[in-house]
Amino acid sequence: MRQAKRTAWFAGLWAGVVLVGVSGCADKLPLAPLPPLKPTVTADVSWKLSVGETQEGVLVPLLHDHVLYVAGETGELEAVDPGSGKSLWSLKTGEAFSAGVGIGEHEILLGNKKGEVLAWLTTGQFLWRSPISSELLAAPQGGDSMVVARTADGKVVGLNEADGKQVWAQSRPMPPLVLRGVGGMTLGQGAALVSLPGGKLLSLNLSDGAVQWESLVSPPHGATELERMNDVLGDPLVGDGLVCTASYQGRAACLESEHGQLVWSRDVDAQGPLVEGGDHLVLTTAKSDVMALDRRTGNVVWKIQSLEGRYLSPPTVTASYVVIGDAEGVVHFLMREDGTEVGRITTDKSPIVQAPVFLGDDRVVVVNREGKIFALTAHAIH
């Protein structure tokens, strides 16, 4: 396939970009030592399970209606009670999953390496498969009777949620190099907001795929294709009339949601998507700094640099903490108010490359590169 030859696939964003299959892979990068800590918070492992080793680290568990759905790259698909870790149902699908887990109105959604979108009912019953033009780059998402998928060859495809048949498609040119598994989308209020390579954010009418607006979040910089990579990261955050996002080697920004006009932007080399924490937007940087920005102005509320060189995952915000994993399997708990690290727990030394999944209160799930899943609950030390 010419597209596969032209496009360089990347796994993780540690140390700038980490090439798949290169000897300097993420679990062999030199790590800075852990800084000293007098913890005021401890964390317990509530339960753990495994979905098999992951080569690309792009399959993220999904919490929906008090059920956690997890998938492995070799086709494991399981529904788990998030409180106890007990399996509600489990399937060996025989698929080679490459993107997921996404959610529709009545189904869970994944993409496989053959370039198909697949749908299962939340009870585990298989619904349909839909071949599209190439492999997916992010989890498919559903809403308003549509399923939307973004592909490796620059297409955004709208499928009928009932049977998977294609309803519409939009195509955008792809830059020579793109990051794997980092772009996403958010569906709501009749629109699909899609993160794109090349620093762009796209708003499409959900029913027919018509372009509502297309805005440049971050222009490319640099002399080489590697330096000019500026993919928009993760699912856009939508609320209060704003769409907020961040780009690799680029900017964090909020745009006006109706017309895509820029409200504010701040130069920052984001490691992953923005995460909402009340009035703050939290992110990690390529240096493994952690920052909180004011949602309305983009001003820096707080920033910590004590974890530089730990190759941090993107964050998750719980009721009390900002929670982040690192390349040595350590999970860090920071105070939401000022970023002070107050606790940490070591899992099993394997890198954590994706943001922890918020389960409610101060509970999270983390997944490492070996496909091991740990449910953690944080408690203040009295």
Image (spheres, grey):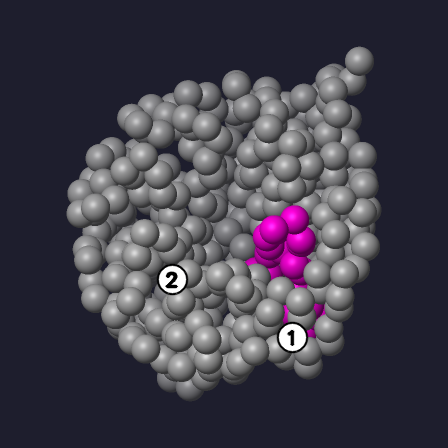
Estimate the x, y position of residue 103 in percent, counting from the top left. Answer: 52, 60
Residue positioned 35% across, 29% down in the render: 295
Give the amino acid at mark 2. Asp
Depth check: give the residue in front, 218 or 256.
256
- Of the two numbered discs 2 and 1 on the same chain, state the one appearing first in sequence: 1
Estimate the x, y position of residue 65 in percent, counting from the top left. Answer: 61, 51
The vertical placement of 341 against 313, above or below, is above
Q: Note whether residue 325 is visible.
A: no
Estimate the x, y position of residue 363 in percent, counting from the top left. Answer: 69, 36
For the residues labelled 2 and 1, the Cα–Cα distance comes to 21 Å
The vertical placement of 345 against 222, above or below, is above
Depth check: give the residue in front, 208 or 32.
208
Estimate the x, y position of residue 286 in percent, counting from the top left. Answer: 48, 42
**Which residue matches tag 2?**
144
Highlighted range, magenta: 58-77
Task: Give left or right: position of 52 versus 121.
Answer: right
Image quarter where the C terminus lies is top right
Q: How many marks?
A: 2
Q: Secondary structure at mark 1?
A: loop
**Which residue matches tag 1?**
125
Give the amino acid at mark 1. Gln
Taking the magenta stretch, the answer to whether it contains residue 44 is no
Depth check: give the residue in front, 106 or 157.
106
The vertical placement of 348 against 88, above or below, is above
Task: Give left or right: position of 203 versus 281.
Answer: left
